[in-house]
Structure formats: C-alpha cells, structure tokens
Amino acid sequence: MIPFEKVKEIIVQHDDLEKELSTGSIEPKLFAKKSKEYANLGNIISIAREYVNFDSLKKDLQQILDDKNNDLEIIELAKKDLNEMETKKKVYENKLKIFLLPKDEDDDKNAIVEIRAGTGGLEASLFCADLFKMYEKVCSKKKWQLELINISKSEAGGFKEVIFSVNGSNIYSYLKYESGVHRVQRIPETETQGRVHTSAATVAVLPEAEEIDIQIKDTDLRIDVFRAGGPGGQSVNTTDSAVRITHIPSGVVVSQQDEKSQHKNKAKALKILRSRVYEAEKRKKDQERSSNRRNQIGSGDRSERIRTYNFPQGRVTDHRINLTLHKLDEFLSGEIHSEMNDELRLKDQNLKLENLK
C-alpha cells in the first residue's frame, strides 16, 4: 500500500508546476529544468488522480452492495465494477511505486571504467584483459562508443590496469552494476598438474563528470610532468609528455602517459580525476543520506565480491542475486550479458520498493 500523502504530493507538485510554467516569467535555464519535471510528472498524473479517487468509488459501490432494496442485476454489476476496480488499483499501485523510486541522477551519464588486476599474479592480469574484451563486445553489441584512456600491459598479453570511457545512452545505469571484485577459477596454461587457480580483478565504474557537475579549482591541483617510460624502463618519449595530476583536497592522483602529446595526456588525466573526485563526493553524500546503501545492488562498493567466472564448470555466478548462468562463453562474448543485468536491475528495484513501505 502506497502512503496516500505521497500520491497527493505528485498531484500538488504537478498542478503547482503547471501554474508556474503558465506565467511565462521563469528564466530560460530554470524553465528548461521545470519543463522536464512537468513532463515527467505528466507521465503518471492521470494514474495518480484516479488512484486517490479509488477509496470514494469503493465506498459508493459498497453502499450499493449493502442496500438490500437494490435489484440483483444492479448488485451483480456493482460486484463486477468493484472487482475490476481492485485489479486496476493494484496495477496503478505498482506503476506509482516504480515512479516513486529514488532516482539516481547519474543514470543518464556516460561512464569511465577502471579494471585492475588483483590477487593471482600473471593469471589475474590475463583475466583483467578478458574482462576488458568482454566489455568491448558488450559495447559493440549495444552500439556504444568505447574509448581507451590508459592501459598498462603485463607479460603474456595481460593487463595490469586498463581505463576506458563508454559513451551512449544511459550508460551508467547499465554499467554501474559491474563495480566490485570479479573472481575467476580456471586452470592456467602454465599449470602442469591440472590444478584450478583462483584469481581476481577489480572493476570500478564511475559516472563521467562534466565541468558543470563539479567545480575543481586550478589552485587545488598540482600538475607534474615527466618523461614517459615503457616496460623494463625503456624510454618511450624523449620529451616530458607524461602528466601526473594531484587533487590536493582529496588526495586523488592520476597519471597519464599513453599519448605523445603532453596536452592530450593532461586532458585525459583531468577527465579521470574529475570523475574520481565527483564519485568520491557522491559516495560520501549517499552514505550520509542512507545507511541502507550498502545493502542495495549497484552501490559501487569495489571491495564487494560480486561475481565468479568458473571455467571448468562453464558457469558465471553473480553472488548479489544468487544467479548462475551455465553459459560462460556466451556471457564473455557479450551475448547474454544483458540477461544478468536485467536480473540485477529487477532486484535493485525490488529492494528500493521495499524501502518505500
């Protein structure tokens, strides 16, 4: 049962915005924002108005049923109307619950994804590369644009770290469920006795922050330039093209040396730094606002073990929702990645709905 006052608030807010927008005296920037709010409320307003009238309609129908002087035909019609109304009320209630769910203001943003090899040495770096290839395939299937920002290679074709951005529609709302520790169980190629080894990689998904999202003062930054170096200490560039930027208030440090141009490296480093600082501040606010956040799916907790990829058994298991898919190859190829994501979204939605009660 939805609190009656919450539904009335939707109606009041809609009517107030309608009056305010009709005056024509709102400044352009605020008008655009309020118009968007009004349009959003317009999607649910008719349901909200009908929902608040259900109780009075039910009383009217109940009076007909209680009146013994009424014809049998009228009573049967009233029973039918009452049953239809109860069914309709449940449908409307579910729609209103979903509408009232707390919105993540970052869902429509692009994302920056950071994958780092964890425990497991060389095997962990190979798994890091496998995860990157999986996300490449997911992006390709969804026609999202993936741009490589930084990559640190290891031996045998693995990655110690890879950072990339993903651009498209509602990217963060999808990829945020990937944040956490991903664990792999398989027999390494170098294993001679056929033993299964366990390795891990950490995935961090950040909403890509624009300059309007967070103000970073130049005085809060320390920028160091240095000569880029390659594997084994070999020189990659004879000029000081590599950049290290430190955000002094938060202590966030980003280094970038993939580009030959210092200007391009600085731009990439700032892009990552802005998103990291924004995400840190967002996390702090979320924790202050809700003690239940850690219990929610997609909270972005990077220390949480979220998924296991078991190669001998050909399965992938998401521990947050206890879902196992015995289609590991299809999952890594991006074919059924959405199947897992849909279940995560549904679970997250149900948890939020429970908090509304």
Image: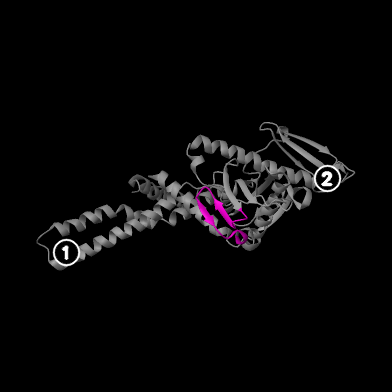
> Which residue is nearer to you in this view: 265 or 292?
292
Q: Which residue in the rendered view is the most extreme toward the left? A: 69
Image location (x, y in percent) of residue 208 = 64, 47
Residue 229 appears in the picture as rendered: no
Residue 84 appears in the picture as rendered: yes
Magenta segment includes 292: no
> In the drawing, does residue 346 fall left or right of residue 165?
left
Q: Secondary structure at mark 2?
A: helix
Q: How crowded is the residue under tag 2: few (<14 C-alpha within 10 Å), some, or many (20+)?
A: few
- Distance from disc 1 to disc 2, alpha carbons, whole Å, reads 85 Å
Image location (x, y in percent) of residue 76 = 18, 66
> Which residue is nearer to you in this view: 328 or 232?
328
Residue corresponding to mark 2: 231
Q: Quadrant of residue 247?
A: top right
Q: Residue at x 74, y 43 (%)?
A: 269
Image location (x, y in percent) of residue 1 = 33, 49
Q: Quadrant of the C terminus?
A: top left
- Give the mark nearer the N terminus: 1 vs 2: 1
> What amino acid is at disc 1?
Ile
Residue corresponding to mark 1: 75
Q: Quadrant of residue 47?
A: bottom left
Image location (x, y in percent) of residue 96 = 40, 53
> In the drawing, does residue 54 fall left or right of residue 43?
left
Q: Secondary structure at mark 1?
A: helix
Q: Which residue in the rendered view is the most extreme toward the front? A: 193
> What amino acid is at disc 2?
Pro
Please state the extent of the stretch shown in magenta in the rendering: 310-330
> In the drawing, does residue 50 fall left or right of residue 218?
left
